Image (cartoon, grey):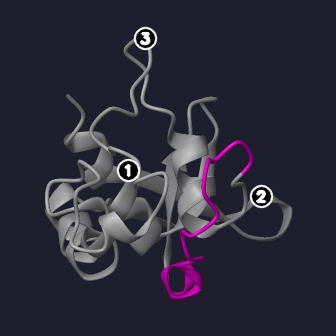
Amino acid sequence: MRIPLICLGLAGTLLACTEVSMPEPDEGQQLFAANCAQCHGPTGQGDGPWASSFSPKPTDLTKLTRDGVFPRARVLSVIDGYDRTGLPGKEMPEFGLLLEGDTVPVDVGDGVLTPTPRPLAALMAYLESIQE
């Protein structure tokens, strides 16, 4: 998906208009395989090779949608480590390296586009794509 962005300069003078290429699920799938599959499994169902060493076992990431709504803000907060409130285990690491680099505008559910690091947005796109 491409989102047009308008950049404004001093006193609202138009400086540039560009499009931002949003991450696709396959970009996030690569990050998932490298960072998440050990615990959450290759398909995100919480059955990775390290899952048996945790109690409770890692979350089934294919069942995050509630009442037809994917909780984008919550997912981003848990991945980046900002909010782990209410999680049964605290074993999930913070993924600070995913917070580096260019940002893309992501609607986290409130209609406001929030600048989000591209890798984090890519992971979210992948997780949203594997919902049952």
Q: Which residue is mark 2?
A: 12
Residue in the foreground of this view, choosing between 119 and 4: 119
Q: Is residue 74 above or below residue 13?
A: above
Position of residue 110 in the picture relative to residue 57 (left or right): right
Residue 2 visible? The answer is no
Q: Disc 3 marks which residue?
A: 67
- In which quadrant of the rendered view does residue 89 lie? bottom right
Q: Earlier in the sequence, mark 1 or mark 3?
A: 1
Mark 2 is surrounded, within 10 Å at the Cα level, by few (under 14), some (14 to 19) or many (20 or more) other residues, namely few
104 relative to 130 in the view: left or right: right
Q: Nearer the viewer, mark 2 or mark 1?
A: 1
Residue plotted at (60% across, 68% down): 80
The kind of residue on which mark 2 rests is Gly
How far from the left and from the top, in percent, is residue 91?
Answer: 57, 70
The crowd level at tag 3 (other Cα within 10 Å; few <14, some 14-19, many 20+) is: few
Q: Amino acid at mark 1?
A: Ile
Q: Residue 16 appears at what percent x and percent y?
A: 52, 69
**Which of 128/20 is in front?**
128
Please identify the residue farthest to the right as the structure is shown. 11
Report how far apart the C-alphas of labels 3 and 2 lie in the structure.
41 Å
Which residue is disc 1 drawn over?
3
Labels 3, 2: front one: 3
- Name the residue rendered at 26%, 54% in the picture: 126
Q: Which residues are magenta?
A: 85-101
